[in-house]
Structures are given as structure tokens and as C-alpha cells.
Image: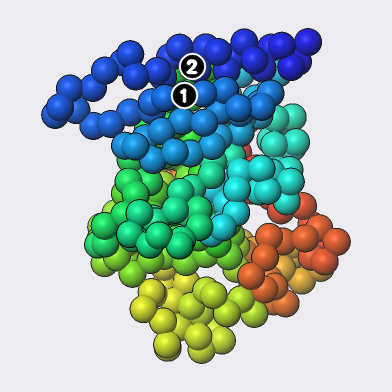
Amino acid sequence: MKRIRTWCLLLILLLACLPGRAWGETEPPGIEDVELSGEDGFICRFDGVKHRVLLALPETPEGAPLVLLLPGYGNTAEAFRTQTHFEQEANARGYAVAYVTGAPDPNVPTSSVGWHAELDTPGNRDLAFLIALKDCLQETWALDRTRAFAVGFSNGALMAHCLAMEAGESFTACVSVAGYMPKSVWEARGESAAVGFFQITGEKDDAVPQNRNGSARFARAPAIEDAMAYWVSANGLEERETVTVGRDAVLTKYAGEGSRRQVWDLLLPNGRHSWPSRNIHQFDVNALILDFFDAQG
């Protein structure tokens, strides 16, 4: 019965997002050429670029907040679902989840799937695509239009910073796991923001520029400490508490009077460039991210 229900819902998506919703020459591109793929996913195109999406809906999708899961470079929606199974806890708590595969860089013939998170170089229009996908999914299943989130890992985490900076009016909060803020996004930052942000960083992650371990001295992108100080300041927040999570992870929470947004910053002292493991770090990172979402007003 669940499989039949899923197929029916995907057929609704197929009808809602087909190019019959024609865009004029001056209109932005939309989600097009939707094809069912497997029992819980579909393939679509945006601006001529193909993406695969896997959906996991709660028992009652209507009014559910949406979470987009963005895998790292070279990783797919299927692999990211197998790695994290974020949908299990999320669906149980009433969240709809969409795992989204990126696309190869059109300027690099040998590139793998990934996300174009820079603002100053040509590439796929991933920022516009993710906003359009969010809108399409919300419309199709009558999801909550006031609450949408994005969680990215590695290259997907760079995209999370980009979404928070450039699409804060579309996303309530974003989460970066083992990622950083791209230089072009940093340079485009405004004085204020109204978007929650959660950064999860391994202290031994050589891919993330950090002042604490000296790696920021050799990086183009800003130190992650500076990026997080920006998210705190731009949202008008202040430190509220610091707690230990699991074995030795340190979680700092920032909030503000009258603000519906929060910023959380989690440091894993022995963490590296990986999705936090429950066995190693002694806490459930999926549940913690959902707690962060729940805290966003």
C-alpha cells in the first residue's frame, strides 16, 4: 500500500511540474521533464541540467516542513540516504525529506556530480534550481511554505552556506556538515540576515579552514570561526549556552530576544572530514539537527 501511495504522489508531481507550465522567454526556468525513477524518486531537469531526487514523506505530508539533503562531491542521493538515513528520524517527527543529486560542472568535462556554490564563476544554476525544487515540492504536497531547510555535507555544505546567504527568504535555516563558506559568498555577505545556521566541524578536518588549527592561513575562503561569527552577528544573536554533546563534542548555541532564528556551532575535537558517527562520537547527529530545526521558532 505504501508503494502504491508513493507512486500516486509522484504521478501528482509529474503532472504538476511538467513543462506544460510553460515559461516565457523572459521567465526563469522551472522544473521540467519529470520522469518517475524507482518507487520513491524522480529525475528532472532545470535549465537543461538533469538531477535525481529521492523523496521520503511523513505519514501526513500536508503541512510538513521540508528538508533538502545535499550530498558531497561525487556522491549521489542514493548514497547519501544509505550513509545517513536522515529520513527515518525526520519522517517520524513530521518532516518531509528530499535527497538531491547535484550535477557535473559543464565547464569541466571530467567532473563528477556536485554543487556550484560559488557566486563569481560560471556554472550550473544550482541556487535557482534548489529554490525551484523546494517550491515545486511544497506546492505538490501542500507542505509548510513557511518552513524549509537544507542540510549539506562537504561540497553540499558549501551550497548550504550559499543558500543561507542568497536565499534566506526561502529557507528557514541551513546546516553545514564538514563544509565552509565559499570566498565569493563571504564577499557578498550583507550586514543582516534572518536565517538560522548550524555548523558541524571536525577539529582535524583539513578541508575546512580553521583559525584554531592554523589551516585558515593558507585558504582562500574565510576561517569557519569568522563565518560563524558573521552568522551570529548578522542575525543579532548572542551566546546563550555551551554544552557537551556525546563523548566530547562542544555545542555552542546563540539566540536573541525577539528573534525566531538560532545559530548553533558544534566542534568535534577528534572529528575529521566525515558525517559524524554515532559509534565514534556517542550522539545521534540526525536527531541533533532536527532539534536545531525545531528550535527555529
Residue drawn at x 45%, y 83% as measured from the top left: 216
Q: Residues within 10 Å of mark 1 (few under 14, many from 20)?
A: many
Taking the image as shown, residue 186 lies to the left or right of residue 44, namely left
Q: Are marks 1 and 2 in contact (CB under 8 Å)?
A: yes
Residue assigned mark 1: 34
Against 229, is 196 above or below? Answer: above
Type of the residue with mark 1: Val
Residue found 67% across the figure and 73% down from its top: 272
User: Residue 42: x and y, percent?
Assistant: 56, 28
Horizontal arrangement in the rendering, residue 71 relative to residue 32 (left or right): right
The number of callouts visible is 2
Image mark for residue 258:
none
Which of the labelled discs sits on residue 14, or is there none?
A: 2
Residue 85: x, y in percent?
73, 43
Q: Relative to 269, does residue 155 appear above or below in the rendering? A: above
- Write down the quadrant of residue 97 in the picture: top right
